[in-house]
Amino acid sequence: MAEKYTDVLRVGVVGIGNMGGTHAVQIFEKKVKGAELTAVCDNSRERLEWAEKRFGDHVLRYENYEQLFDSEKIDAVLIATPHKLHPVIAIEAFKRKLNVLTEKPAGIDVASVSEMNDAASRSGVVFGIMYNQRTNQLYRRLRDMVKEGVLGEIKRFIWIINNWYRTQAYYDSGDWRATWNGEGGGVLLNQCPHNLDIWQWIMGMPVRVRAFCNAGHYHNIQVEDDATIYAEYENGSSAVFITSTGEYPGTNRIEISGTKGKAVVENGELRLYLLEEDEREICFSSLEGMPEERINSYLIKQEKADGGHLEILQNFTDAVLRGKELIAPGIEGIYGLMISNAAYLSAWKEDWVQLPADEQEFRELLTKKQKEEKEIRKKVKRENFSGEYSDRWKVRW
């Protein structure tokens, strides 16, 4: 049982770059009820100088996260560092009984995330992950429909999510971007952790995958900017996941087909096409070769904007202060990563990979990629920073 704080949750943000800095600003400006920004931490002098100007003496500044954790000035930490450091920092926080909210992805390899999850379970504190797309009402409704059996037995899940367009300037804006050593991968590790999470959140985990990950297909980078994953489930159903950062205009379309009909999510709408009789019954009872069955259509539009990052921040704060159920428990961050790790391993081996994938084999091949990596891009330049949540972090249709 996590320790409760009666009125205010004192939050420290580790990593105040573009994402972490934005979270810090939102908490500082009291956008999250019950949360107070008391400290920030970054190893960049430039970012700490920014924090001094932005927050003044109201917020403490640290260069070392362990000093922050030992300061007794915070009750919770928000981690927004390069991906591979998420488990490292979270484990240290758990040792000190600090509540943790980590940015996505949970990490870059399943083994380290498993260690983080074990540490979280032992600590008894609240552990969340910034899966802000779980706040989208259409994704929530689609998940409920699948679990309630509205579509019958699921046959196929297809997601084309290639509206993550990025230019070379985007990749050149940070030396950690799109690198095996910095991000631990490309589009699957940076843009798609949200989508991989929503996939498994709705459908559950597949049992094996065959993936094709094209490195530097559209950009001057050494990690994948184009990927296709084919997955199979224990019951015989299948899934296809297609993504890239090099197609414009892109598509964001989910289609799920089942024995009672299909559901399509696109352009901010959920469309249902439901049969009056289960297709399996039709298949084996109809005397017609190509029957035309009655289809009932329904339209559900997105009526309100996603709660996004602020809803996750508020939910995490409420979970600590009042025991509210988490929208995105941190331990669930491992599932989407299990899919992306298996996809990489499949692409590298040019073969099928069973889930869960061999953690040691993945680590060895990832380490090899990291050792072989060379800097091939031009001089890094920093992105403009606004302190506001950008549309690029929301569900975009």
Image: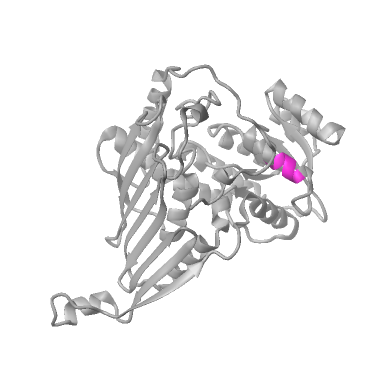
Can see residue 95?
A: no
Percent position of residue 183, x then y: 50, 31
The image shows residue 381, relative to residue 145, as above or below, that is above
Residue 25 visible in the snapshot: yes
In this rendering, position of residue 33 left or right of residue 340:
right
As displayed, is residue 267 above or below residue 244? Answer: below
Position above or below: 212 against 288: above
Left or right, 264 with reference to 174: left
Q: Residue at x 66, y 37 (%)?
A: 20
- Residue closer to the observer: 324 or 36: 36
Position above or below: 57 against 327: above
Question: Is the N terminus in the top left, top right, bottom left or bottom right quadrant?
Answer: bottom right
Q: Nearer the viewer, residue 41 or 293?
A: 293
Q: Residue 298's image quarter?
A: bottom left
Q: Give the residues in magenta.
A: 23-27
Q: Total label count?
A: 0
The colour scheme of the drawn protein is one colour
**Residue 203 magenta-drawn?**
no
Nearer to us in this view, 157 or 321: 157
Residue 354: x and y in percent read: 31, 46
Magenta residues, dominant SS class: helix
In this view, which residue lies farthest toward the front? 249
Q: Position of residue 84 (x, y in %)?
A: 53, 32
Query: Who is closer to the viewer here, 187 or 300?
Result: 300
Q: Residue furthest right?
A: 57
Counting from the top left corner in percent of width and height, residue 32 is at 74, 51
Q: At 33% from the left edge and 45% from the top edge, which residue is drawn?
A: 229
Q: Is residue 386 left or right of residue 339?
A: right
